Amino acid sequence: MNAIDATKVSKQYSSTTALDRVDLTVEEGETFGFLGPNGAGKSTFINILLDFAKPSDGQVEIFGADCQRNGVEARERVGVLPEGYSVIERLTGRQHIEYAIRSKDAHGTNPLDILDRVGIRDAADRKASGYSKGMAQRLVLGMALVGEPDLLLLDEPSTGLDPNGAAEMRQILREENERGATIFFSSHILEQVEAVCDRVGILQNGELVAVDTIEGLRESMGGGTKLVLTLDELHDSMLTEIEGIDGVETVASLGDSTIEVTCTNDAKMDIVVALHEAGIEVMNFKTEEASLEDMFIEYTGSRGR
Amino acid sequence: MTWRDIAHKDINDAGRSKSIWLLVGILLALSLGYAYAHQYLGEETFVGFVNGLAGVIALVLPLLAVMLGYKAIVHERTSGSLLLSLSLPHNRRDLALGTFVGRSVVLLVPTLVALVLAGGLGAILYGTEGIARYPWFLFATVLFGLSFVGIAVGLSMSTTRDRWITFGALGGYLLLVNFWGLLHTMTLVILHRFDTAVLLPQNLPEWSYLYRLLEPGQAYYRLLELGFDGQRASLYVRESAPFYVDWWMAVLLLVLWTVVPMLLGYRRFSSGDL
């Protein structure tokens, strides 16, 4: 059985389309990164999974339970870190965890263990409304971990966390995945996704434009090679000239006389030869593997930060 | 049955609010204050005291219930703490029911405590004749309080527009507590082409008894009439009154005032996006 099964999910707001016939399957046990720039529709999709929003068309299932008609059953096996929440005004951190324990019938779980795991045990008996954004994020992650859920559904989990906190969060996600939980999380920050995900889906303007493993994405970019070339001199006209060479995808000047070229793997030498023929001397030459960030820009046309 | 978890959370949350102490203070001050002051205001019997106290409750309890409930859901919804509850395995129906139960407990426990204390003081000052029916008064007060909690929580589910909620709460209170009698009178006079003779008790058409009884406060008094034959609801026991304005109708109406606003609010709450 699949952890998440979405079939032609669309969401229409009066005049805008937030989601356009999204088909997505997340298998049990995998860590899936849901990537896209802000406003691409990631939260809308997650909100439909949680029945915070109703789809205009299509349907979604979590472990075979329809998220709209059978939402409670679907959520019984899920730990959630939603977006745009606020903590419950007058409850302490510990009471928040207790609320989750009670709601998930996870009696026997010690709230302090959970708070310890997410690193805010010291603040257990303070009102959560006084927490910083990062602490609140840790608290709600803690609520999500209660009851060893089979699926963790996290909307921008690293929001408000410092780099250290984000690394701890990733560590927890890895541990949960090793325990057997499926992880589905959205992010607009690539390094998060690159570091932990088995597969990635890229959402842009409500459309799922790519679903693949990170290597798969690299391959689909034609090997995804990046050339960094230092030339003896650089004129603007050369950039257009290089762009015209077969196999070249993008050309960018890095200042001085260094340029960065992304291209298919087998075009590398052609470029160097073509430059030579054009009388441009190459002083230095190195290749890099394209990062996910390059792919992300390629797919979404935006620098996702 | 997960509404219990929600109610538990709601009581924990609302119960820690400072305004709860204000609520407790108001209820205690008014009930005990009235119990003491009754000797200067009315007939010095226990039954007379209960009738007087009911008059105070009929004004104050709706106000407290509305204040406690009219933002219950909408506030959680706009602030986002609702998302935490609904991320857990709760559906919106349990959330609505749990919130209603939670707010009812937060309102009615202090109310009952205040009324029991006031009843004790009343018994000391005015004698114990009729005290056996005091639980009936408490029961009627609970039903009456629930109806306004239902109205308020139902309202808080109906929309996210603050302005409508505020107008609705204020308007609802004024209409149901202050102006229903006037509305009743005006309806009758207009229907009878401004012949005010219709207002004489012997001329009242039968349906208008029920119309009058629709006001939750009247239903409350009608219930009390059963145990404390005071003067507040004598209208419904006169001979010309139709049989269906009996005490059971008062119970039915109070239950409807609780349930119908909750259902209407829930219908809008359950179908919309958060």
Image (cartoon, coloured by chain):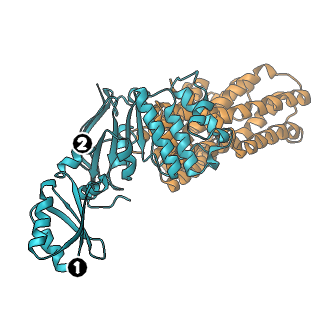
Q: Position of residue B169 (x, y in %)?
A: 57, 49
Up the image or down, A220 lies above or below B232; here it is below
Q: Nearer the viewer, residue B6 or A75?
A: A75
Residue furthest top in the image:
B132
Determine if residue A117 is in view: yes
Q: CA distance from mark 1 to mark 2?
A: 40 Å
Q: Position of residue B86 (x, y in %)?
A: 47, 36
To the question of a shared chain for discs 1 and 2, the answer is: yes
Q: Looking at the rendering, which quadrant does residue B108 occupy? A: top right
Task: Please tell me the colour of chain A.
Answer: cyan
Up the image or down, B235 lies above or below A250; here it is above
Q: Nearer the viewer, residue A162 or A114?
A: A162
Q: Is residue B230 left or right of residue A290?
A: right
Q: Looking at the rendering, which quadrant does residue A94 occupy? A: top right
Up the image or down, B137 lies above or below A32; here it is above
Q: Badges 1 and 2: C-beta atoms under 8 Å apart?
A: no
Density class for disc 2 (Cα within 10 Å; few <14, some 14-19, many ≥20) is some
Mark 2, residue position: A212
Residue positioned 53% across, 23% down in the render: A106
In the picture, the disc for residue B117 is none
SS for callout 2: strand
Mark 1, residue position: A233
Output the chain of dot 1.
A
Determine if residue B217 is in view: no
Q: Amino acid at mark 2?
A: Asp
Q: Amino acid at mark 1?
A: Glu
